[in-house]
Amino acid sequence: MSIDSSPLETARPKRRLTRILGFAAIVLLLLLVGIVPRLGRRNAAVAQARSVEEEVPIISISQAKAAPPSSELLLPGNTQAVTVAAVYARASGYVSKRLVDIGSKVKAGQLLAVIESPEVDQELAQAKANVEQARAGLEQAKATLQQSDAGLNQAKANLEQANANQEISRLSYSRWDRLVTKGVVSKQAADERRTDFSAKQAGVAASEASIHTAEANIVAQQANVGAAQAALVAQQANVKRLEELRGFERVVAPFDGIITERKVERGDLITAGSGGDRNLFSIAQPQTLRIQVNVPQAFSVDLLPGQSAEVIVAERPGEHFEGKVVRTANSLNAASRTLLAEVQLQNKDGRLLPGMYSQVKFIVPATRSAVIVPADTLVVNSQGTRAIVVSPQHTLHYVPIQVGRDFGTSVEILDGLKAGETVVSNPADTLAEGQRVQIQANVPPKE
């Protein structure tokens, strides 16, 4: 038994070792199959990267050109009449006549409509009656004043007579008093003369009081006359106001022009004033037109009053209308960053209509030096807006630039580039600072 089992026990470890070695060979084979191609691809990629790094890239270039001394600026605008007015009613009532309609040519002062205002007519009649009443009161006050003057004159005459009677009584009393002293007449007679003199003195005092009363009465009557005159003036002013208000029943044109809007018909109820925001008519004077244009900030410092402008309207093909910048707002709109400018032009032949959409062409002189480059030469990233300049030694240099106006395929560079410099067109992201490059043969060299 021991002799037979020994070979079997020896064979089992050998088979196990064989299995392990086979499994290891399979694993190794699989690793070689997966790793070797990957290593090959990696080596190829590294070799290709090295070849790219060692290879000099070929680029296309453009020339930075000096900007022209002036440029055209075409902007939209709305055509409006310089003189426009909304005609409102100044009197309340009903429209009894409407004499014009839209498109009617009118002259200054021409009658446009008639408004009936019965209340105003009645108030005017009452005011005129009040004037007559105030005038009668004034005449009565003047008559009373004249009576007071006559009373004063009478009081003055009475005073003079009282003074004369007093003087006679004084002289008589003086003589009788001396006669009493001599014993010629009785003392009773002298007392009678003294009493009479005292009465005459009282009469003088009463006459003086009458004069003061008459003078005070005159002052009062003069005040009554002044009040009556003021009342008359007030009533006359009220009559004049109502007459002018009745004159507003006739709605007239404020200036020569064309009726552009009509909002009333015969029989409409009209309220005086503009609070209801319902004007009767709108009048425009189209002989002179104005166009308001919003000029971008980039051109705002170059556009000045007095510059010429050309107005183009699509409905008048082939025609160009000459205008002039008359004023600017001298301030930019904070929301749109634009400058409001006004262009005026003569329109005596009526070829243009107020409200037309138009385009305004400006010839703007350049007030600063700038260059023009193609739009595809700009490099815009987190480091800002830059351009890549190619040196005479064909090396690259990134320069920061300040962009001005955008012309579509080209842009204006205000700072950072000079006229004649060579810049890279359609630069790739792989271009680096100081890198040496080759220039395409079909691109003309720098002059």
Image (cartoon, rainbow, N blue to C red):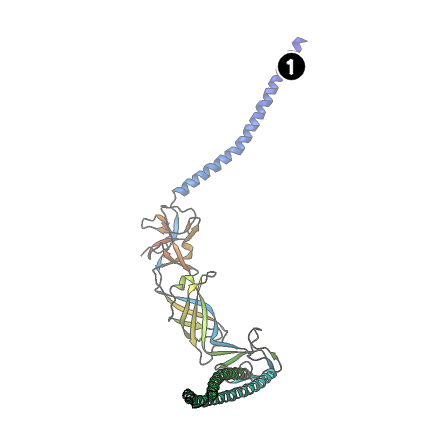
Image quarter hosting the N terminus: top right
Q: Position of residue 165 (x, y in %)?
A: 45, 90
Residue 53, by quadrant, is: top left
Residue 107 seen from this side:
no
Say whether residue 374 is left or right of residue 278. Answer: left
Image quarter hosting the C terminus: bottom left
Farthest residue, direction top: 2
Farthest residue, direction right: 1
Is 211 or 366 nearer to us in this picture? Answer: 211
SS for callout 1: helix
Is 34 or 267 nearer to us in this picture? Answer: 267
Q: Position of residue 168 (x, y in %)?
A: 43, 90
Is 392 or 240 nearer to us in this picture? Answer: 240
Residue 93 seen from this side:
yes
Q: Which amino acid type is marked by label 1?
A: Leu
Which residue corresponds to the image point at 56% horizontal and 80% vertical from the top-left?
A: 91
Q: Residues within 10 Å of mark 1 (few under 14, many from 20)?
A: few
Q: Position of residue 335 (x, y in %)?
A: 48, 60
Where 189 falls versus 54 (above or below)? Answer: below
Q: Position of residue 219 (x, y in %)?
A: 48, 82
Which residue corresponds to the image point at 51% horizontal and 81% vertical from the top-left?
A: 258
Farthest residue, direction front: 183
Residue 127, by quadrant, is: bottom right
Is 97 or 343 nearer to us in this picture? Answer: 97
Which residue corresponds to the image point at 55% horizontal and 31% vertical from the top-left?
A: 30
Marker count (numbered): 1
Q: Can you identify the residue that label 1 sits on?
A: 8
Where 128 falls versus 404 (above or below)? Answer: below
